[in-house]
Image (cartoon, grey):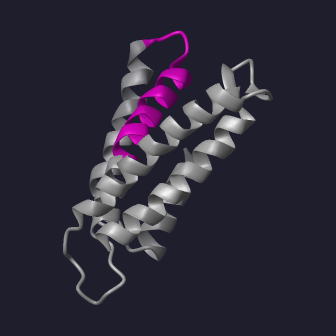
Amino acid sequence: MAIGVIAFIFLSYFLVFFPPSIFVVILPLISCIFIRELFRNAEKPFNNIAITILGVIYLALPLALMSAISQFSFTPSEGTYHPFIILGYVFIVWIYDIGGFTFGRRMGKHKLFERISPKKTWEGVIGGAVVALLAAVVYLKIFY
């Protein structure tokens, strides 16, 4: 938890992404999770706390960052919403998945991690990355 708080402070101070007043909301909520587990008398309270906090972070952080990325701009016109950034991200991830599946199915011989995902291959990873890179270049030329 200390590492998460340090990372949160780092992001809020150096990246100016979070306003400092967010600590007024976040820290009491995290304290409530600890207090709830204290009085539940659960068998593994730290596992429950970790699952609760990481579950919230796993859902909320990517969505918040996606929202922040959609308003990112290299030009001085800050504060404008760019939906094509989010659409491009989803599109490139989708193309990577399709390219990885296709290349892995057709040319895959060397297994990546059989214990975790038995049908994934190194050829699929490299093929998916190449196809996603090409799709990103095409997407960039079309929308920007």
Q: Residue furthest front?
A: 106
The majority secondary structure of the magenta stretch comes to helix
Does 73 appear above or below 21? Answer: below
Towards the viewer: 93 or 51: 93
- Visible in this render: residue 31? yes
Image-based side of 6 in relation to 111, left or right: left
Residue 60 is a magenta residue = yes
Does 18 appear above or below 95? Answer: below
Towards the viewer: 32 or 14: 14
Residue 27 is a magenta residue = no
Which residue does the image show at 41% across and 68% down from the upper left?
Answer: 12
Which residue does the image show at 44% across and 73% down from the upper left?
Answer: 15
- x and y percentages locating residue 82 in the rendered image: 24, 67
Q: Which residues are magenta?
A: 41-62
Q: Quadrant of residue 41?
A: top left
Towards the viewer: 37 or 86: 86
- x and y percentages locating residue 106 in the rendered image: 65, 28
Does 68 appear above or below 35? Answer: below
Q: Quadrant of residue 112?
A: top right
Which residue does the image show at 74% across and 36% down from the upper left?
Answer: 122
Q: Quadrant of the C terminus?
A: bottom left
- x and y percentages locating residue 42 in the rendered image: 47, 11
Q: Quadrant of residue 84?
A: bottom left
Towards the viewer: 123 or 65: 123
Which residue does the image show at 42% across and 63% down from the upper left?
Answer: 138
Q: Quadrant of the N terminus?
A: top right
